Amino acid sequence: MPPTASGAPIGAHRSGSGWLKVGCSLLLSLVCASSVLAAPAAGTKRPPKNPPAAASQAAAPVVPAPPAAPAPLSSATELDLERFMGLWYKVAKVDEPQEALRTRERYGFLQRYDGGVRVIATSYDPLSNRWDRRQDYMAPVDTKGAAFNSHYQLAMPVHFSVSRFGPFGVSYYVVALDPSYQWAVVSGPGPQSFSILSRKSELEPELRSALEQLANRMQLLRAPLRWPGTEQDAVSQ
């Protein structure tokens, strides 16, 4: 074999070049194999490292909050007779036995020239199946039953004497009054009689509950309070 310029045989150079090609091919194969092993399989998803707690646990049932208690009602400290005039509905009551069956009761208060009040009372009697309408006279009086000189600003509670004929009458007391004159709490004429008057024929449940609480705080209820039917038929005045 003829020698090369360096003195080594030509076959030796060819043999070394072949081994170099084989080594490079092996190295390239190892690099490709390692990259294939490191890559995830197609179509697979890696699980999250820290799954959210909401996904791993069932949602806790929602418990509704209990209804809030109605706010305590406050009463006016004075009764303005002019503002008290007008139409009132009796929406709740504790009546004497002879008055217990009356329903759909309402009262129209009209101020008279002498400072007194004309009362037009309308109610329905289911026993006789007819409407009852009567007129009374009402005047504010002091603790001795004497009429006030001034009938306009009256300190609460206000004592009214109601009569149909003559100077003798029965006593009613306005013991609590809405500052906006939308409801009034009245006791009398009997020792157990008690009623709630309202400018509207129906009250919201929250206001009903608050008025009952007010009556209990004032120790006015000596029997269960009744909320009769509140539909108001048209009645000519």
Image (tube, rainbow, N blue to C red):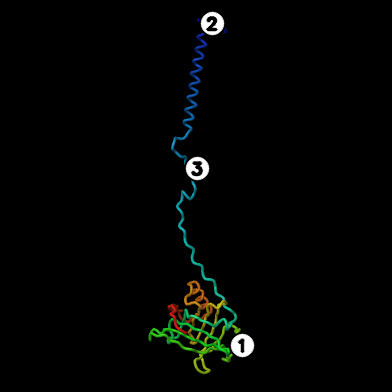
**What SS does tag 2 mark?**
loop
Q: What's the amino acid at mark 3?
A: Lys
Q: Nearer the viewer, mark 1 or mark 2?
A: 1
- Looking at marks 1 and 2 on the same chain, the residue that comes earlier in the sequence is marked by 2
Q: Which residue is at a point 46% across and 51% down the rendered structure image?
A: 57
Instruction: Answer few, some or many: residues within 10 Å of disc 3's Cα (few below 14, many 20 plus, some between 14 and 19).
Output: few
Q: Position of residue 9 (x, y in %)?
A: 52, 7
Task: Identify residue type, mark 2.
Answer: Pro
- 57, above or below 80, in the image: above
Q: Nearer the viewer, residue 168 or 64?
A: 168
Q: Nearer the viewer, residue 183 or 214?
A: 183
Residue at the image point whose x is 52% and y is 4% from the top: 2
> In the rendering, at what x and y percent does residue 80 appear?
59, 82
Q: Which residue is mark 2?
A: 3
In space, the residues marked 1 and 3 are separated at their CA atoms by 85 Å
Q: Which amino acid, mark 1?
A: Ser
Q: Which residue is mark 1?
A: 150
Q: Is residue 207 above or below residue 150?
A: above
